[in-house]
Image: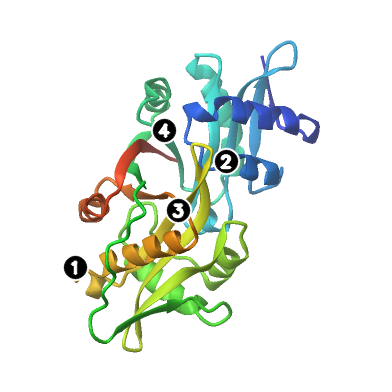
């Protein structure tokens, strides 16, 4: 076996390896569109292990983009070996650590059904930081949306509302595991420019002239079919517990209906029991679960 940094001439083989094994893994960054845009650079350090015939038998790739670096974290795009030997994973980990200056933690999402990889994570001394559940809503009948007096919802205005979006989202997620790192106006601008953007898909909730909540609906795919992904959905802490999250959720569901989506999807942290209960009450059903394993560097 030979460990090496991925070369440009091996990129096609790496992409095929990712596609071959993505059903075993968290495939958040292994969709065809993501892999088509994958570039070998400092944000995507990638290593492979090849057999004597030059075929890839293991691969590991980190995502160290602006958002991850701000949080001093790096996320695995893929961490997989066809060879069931923890030493292969150790080799890949050792290579990747050379790219983690100023990074304090590595993390990876492992499907709850993949006990083999979970065992490897434990042998590598990763620990479970949290559990995340994926919920899908099939019924597009949307409950009545009734705003309390003095409240209004309007579309996000590009070039004007980036600061507002950051203030609400960052305050609402300040204590939410995995989302504590603040976003910046530049990052919000990129949401509007991204391929998954839906026209009118970003909404802001106001109490008179005070922005108190935000929600976004974005293009996505699940099980090979189009679906609208809801998130973030955030409410200022002092406005939580007033039923406003339900209003924003129904706003997103109404958007999905207007855009002719048959299904909606969202994710929720296991410890966020109140939010999960809301989603289940509003017709979502749990379809998948993952454990977020974390490694302290």
Name the residue carrying label 1: 241
Q: Residue 260: image x %, image y %?
A: 48, 57
Work out how far the residue at label 2 is from the one at label 3, CA to CA, in angstroms.
Answer: 24 Å
CB contact under 8 Å: marks 3 and 1: no
Work out how far the residue at label 2 is from the one at label 4, CA to CA, in angstroms.
Answer: 15 Å
Mark 3 residue element: strand
Name the residue carrying label 2: 62
Image quadrant where residue 186 sits: bottom right
Residue toward you, 171 or 245? 245
Work out how far the residue at label 3 is from the one at label 1, CA to CA, in angstroms.
Answer: 23 Å
CB contact under 8 Å: marks 3 and 4: no
Work out how far the residue at label 1 is from the one at label 4, CA to CA, in angstroms.
Answer: 32 Å
CB contact under 8 Å: marks 1 and 2: no
Left or right: 293 with respect to 259? left
Q: 10 Å neighbourhood of mark 1: few (<14), some, or many (≥20)?
A: few
Quick one: quadrant of the N terminus?
Answer: top right
Name the residue carrying label 4: 110
Query: Visible in this render: residue 181?
Result: no
């Amino acid at each position: 076996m030979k460990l090496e940094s991925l070369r440009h001439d091996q990129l096609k083989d790496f992409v095929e390896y990712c596609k071959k094994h993505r059903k075993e893994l968290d495939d958040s960054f292994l969709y065809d569109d993501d892999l088509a845009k994958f570039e070998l650079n400092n944000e995507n350090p990638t290593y492979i292990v090849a057999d004597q015939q030059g075929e890839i038998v293991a691969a590991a790739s980190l995502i160290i983009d602006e958002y991850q670096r701000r949080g001093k974290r790096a996320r695995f795009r893929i961490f997989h070996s066809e060879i069931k030997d923890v030493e292969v994973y150790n080799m890949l980990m050792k290579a990747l650590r050379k790219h983690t200056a100023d990074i304090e933690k590595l993390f990876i999402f492992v499907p709850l059904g993949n006990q083999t990889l979970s065992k490897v994570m434990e042998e590598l001394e990763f620990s479970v930081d949290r559990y995340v559940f994926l919920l899908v809503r099939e019924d597009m009948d949307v409950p009545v949306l009734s705003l309390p007096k003095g409240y209004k919802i309007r579309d996000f205005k590009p070039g004007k509302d980036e600061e507002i979006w950051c203030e609400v989202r960052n305050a609402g997620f300040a204590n939410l595991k995995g989302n504590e790192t603040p976003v910046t106006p530049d990052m919000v601008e990129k949401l509007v420019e991204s391929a998954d953007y839906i026209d009118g898909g970003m909404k802001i909730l106001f109490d008179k002239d005070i922005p108190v909540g935000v929600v976004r609906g974005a293009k996505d795919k699940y099980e090979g079919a189009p679906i609208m992904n809801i998130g973030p959905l955030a409410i200022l802490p002092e406005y939580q517990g007033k039923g406003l999250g339900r209003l924003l959720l129904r706003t997103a569901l109404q958007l999905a209906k207007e855009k002719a989506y048959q299904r909606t999807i969202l994710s929720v942290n296991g410890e966020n029991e109140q939010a999960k209960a809301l989603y289940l009450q509003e017709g979502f059903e749990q379809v998948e679960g993952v454990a977020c394993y974390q490694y302290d560097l």
